[in-house]
Image: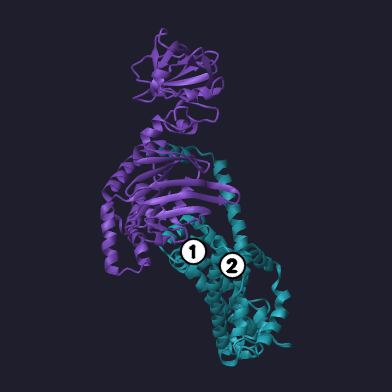
Chain colours: A purple, B cyan
Amino acid sequence: MSEIELRQLTKKFGNYAAVNNVSMKIPEGEFLVLLGPSGCGKSTILRLIAGLEEVSSGEIKIGDRIVNFVDPVKRNVAMVFQNYALYPHMSVFKNIAFPLETAKLPKSEVEVAVRDAARMLEIESLLDRLPAQLSGGQRQRVALARAIVRHPVAFLMDEPLSNLDAQLRQQTRLELMSLHQRLGITTLYVTHDQVEALTMGDRIAVMREGIMQQLGSPSDLYRFPVNTFVASFMGSPPMNLLNGTLQKISNDWEFSTEQIHFGIDRNKSGFVSSNLEAHASRAVQLGVRPEDFFFVGSEFDNAISGVIKFVELTGADQFISVEVGSQIIVVRTTPSEEMSVGRRVAIGTNPADVHLFGEDGMNLRI
Amino acid sequence: MDGMTQPQDVALNDREPKWQIARRSFQAGSAYSVLALFVFVAVGPIIYIISPAFRDSKSLFSYPPQWIPDRWFTGNFTFLFSETHYLRWAVNTLIFATAVTLISLVIDTLAGYAFARMTFPGKRVLFSLILATLMIPMAAILAPTYLLVRFLDGWTFGLIGTDTYGGLILPMTVSPLGVFMMRQFIETIPVGLYEAARMDGASEWRIFRKIVLPLIKPALVVLGIFVFMMQWSNFLWPLVVTSRDEFRVLNVGVSTLQGQFVTNWGVIAAATLLTLIPVTIVFLFFQRWFVQASIAGALKE
């Protein structure tokens, strides 16, 4: 029984709501990623669940127990801190054993449990060392071993990879995922890195200024972002967002700026007409992911014409920035397409890949 | 690397102009003379008392002054041990300095921990008050403290009072500086460690005992040495609170050797010399820690 449920969870620091009315249910064994920029309240949620902060209002349920006023240790969740928080004066063995010794387990049991945890994370040979003698990756493993040694019902991980270098981060990411597969422990994982979120999460909750924006599977979030914030936070480079107005022309719809007249075919693009109707003649943003744009001939339906401003090669991909009026559209192509700065090009997209966002930032598709 | 530095070294030896060598030796020379002056100022008085300690009172004022005695006279020392309570004073000083050190370490670390890590109403006001007492000189609270100790005499079954160890030791164990120092040091311990320990189920006491104390060991040693040396040479308070010879500490005891009309300077020099030995040993013994603590801040991750 290790399902975690948050009900209208709110945490205020003075008048400022760091976490504002967040509700979610994390089923047993799920790997849920809390994603958002710094200061969005994602770490605070973690600390509330851990019991390091007191809830202002709402409820936290772990299993079938409301734990709002339960001691951290009795919630039986384990936390992995960003800077690992290893006890610098204790050997690796002592570090891992600390929670068990605190719980006054007999020495022989502690020994067995520590060795088991160390074996699982392949740090058996490091047990006598001090944290200062370990590399970043090894410290990370020790922190994980200390977390799993007392068989918690849930893991809370606060940006555990952010102190590692890029290469090690990728490797550790895979290890964390395989550890999760083996143990099947409910995991809440906080990060500001959308790549981590997309690759690791069963589901992702995107946070902004204490408010949960969207909760869903990585592909849902990527394909159907609920608003411009989620749209621009997921994906690198982010979704292109073009400012313009939504015009009704006779019986059809058009996204228009001075340079762009982009017809919205309701049948092909799947927009609900009442949604479009509500935004008629008002400012909207057109959203298209860089990979959904491609270079076309000028005779292509709804082609947008512009001038190439930058060409960025990143190895497998090539990002072309096209200037259209005062706005820039980024297009992702393969490096084989030869592009030169200053060339006039036309780009197009499929109607189904187009999003429209209203003045309030909300996606008109949802 | 080698290939780069070697030719340069050769060039230095071969072509360095003489005036440059001269300038450098002049610089080194002047640096050393300044340092030597400081050393002389610091060590001079100590050297100065060695000579009279080993001479009898007649040869003390001989003219011309004699720096190195032609006969090493030990009578000053035998006088100390046979005719005065020197040993008793030494034991008293040891008890006094050690007890003050140990008790203040306990008080300062606990108070420092509370001020650094706990939240309680009035914390800031209380801490400001403690710091404010730093501004009050010992001389100003001498009389009130004395009166308090004398008053307590009747209430503590003779544990605290004039001419008792309790009265001698306890008033010296509260030092705002120690509380401040420990608080500052404990605050440098990352908050994450406390939170991790709390998540691991550790109680406040266990966190203090198993996490904080081991991590502030260098600070404990520094504060310990500091307090010990301060109290070893403390004069004013022991002078005021003790009047019976068997409760006197070294400094006070030695000062009583200075008579109104006749003073045996040889004996005083011998006593002073002996008094210096234990503190010197303590310092040398813990010096390693002292140095470690002062660089600890620079190396902390």
Q: Is residue B89 above or below residue A253?
A: below
How much space separates mark 1 and mark 2, taking CA atoms?
A: 13 Å
x, y (%) of residue B88? 56, 88
x, y (%) of residue A344? 46, 10
Which residue shows up at 49% across the image and 33% down it? A229
Chain of residue at mark 1: B
Q: Earlier in the sequence, mark 1 or mark 2?
A: 2
The residue carrying mark 2 is B179
Q: Where, by quadrant of the figure, is residue B21 drawn?
A: top right
Marks 1 and 2: same chain? yes
> Of B238 and A244, which appears nearest the observer?
A244
Q: Is residue B194 above or below residue A197?
A: below
Q: Which element is circle 1 on?
A: loop
Identity of the amino acid at label 1?
Ile
Instruction: Name the mark on residue B216.
Output: 1
Q: Where, by quadrant of the figure, is residue A257 drawn?
A: top right
